[in-house]
Image (spheres, helix red, strand yellow):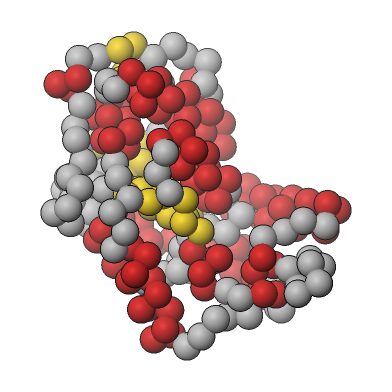
Amino acid sequence: MTADRAGGGPAPERVVLGALAQARRVAVVGCPGSGKTWLATRLAALTGLPYVGLDDHYFDRAWQVRGPAERWRADHEVLVQGTSWVMDGLHSTTLPDRLHRADAVVWLDYPTRVCVLGYLRRTARWRLTGRAPGYASAADGAVRLPPDAASFLRFILTFRRRRRPALAELLARQGADCPVVRLTRRSQVPGLLEALTASVDSGEALTASVDSGGQGRPARRDRRDAVAAPDDNR
């Protein structure tokens, strides 16, 4: 795991975990297929913050966009003005507004092959189980793939070359009071969740190794080491 602040250098891991555990608004971003929804729902359950899936608001049934771009911007503005949330989704046109409100960001910055495999596994699971989110289902409940599945797959295949540079630049501009937690391997996720669980349960910031894959035992630190994320000044 790495954590970036404005100006470049990495933030100490214990500070990052303390800020993430105390954040009221957390944005989870990354390439499609990286597992944003899976992680965001678990972060929401762990912290007690409301989960907001942007695709649930952007799409209607069977991948039909709910309305014109102006409506989406208005709907998105209402969502991000909430006092607390864990929000997953990229939606680059509205991402700057989301980041402006966020207290912390989790960036799933995985290799292309990982995202492609994640997308294919998710699609297969939906088809095999017959269960998918409302936006990926028809009115009769039948699973529906994106209208142009080939283009969607190309989007994932070219994401690191075409989309990632702009995303990285945008995240690099986040202020010091909004840490960006960057995960580069799926194996880092269990360690992050374990460390956050201990932090939330104890109310204390922790020093823990996310790279341990959840096997390391976090060491408790004094509450004064925690960095509280502001609730209403962003």
Q: Residue at x 43, y 79 (%)?
A: 72
Task: Return the x and y of residue 132 as percentages of the image width and height.
Answer: 72, 59
Nearer to the camera, 129 or 8: 129
Q: Is residue 41 left or right of residue 99?
A: right
| Quadrant assignment for the C terminus | bottom left
Q: Is residue 121 left or right of residue 228?
A: right
Any part of residue 72 in sight: yes
Coordinates of residue 117 in the picture (x, y in percent): 70, 50
Q: Position of residue 61 (x, y in %)?
A: 67, 74
Q: 156 left or right of 40?
A: right
Looking at this view, is 212 or 223 the one in front?
223
Q: From where the camera sits, is residue 113 visible?
A: no
Q: How many marks?
A: 0
Query: Is 219 located above or below residue 170 in the figure?
Result: above
Residue 88 in picture, x, y percent from top left: 47, 55
Residue 221 lies, with reference to residue 176, above or below; the image says above
**Considering only vertical position in the picture, is 163 above or below 173?**
below
Which quadrant of the figure has residue 169? bottom left
Residue under the image location 36 percent in, 78 percent down: 74
> What's the residue at 31%, 59% (across, down)?
82
Q: Is residue 72 left or right of residue 24?
A: right
Residue 81 quadrant: bottom left
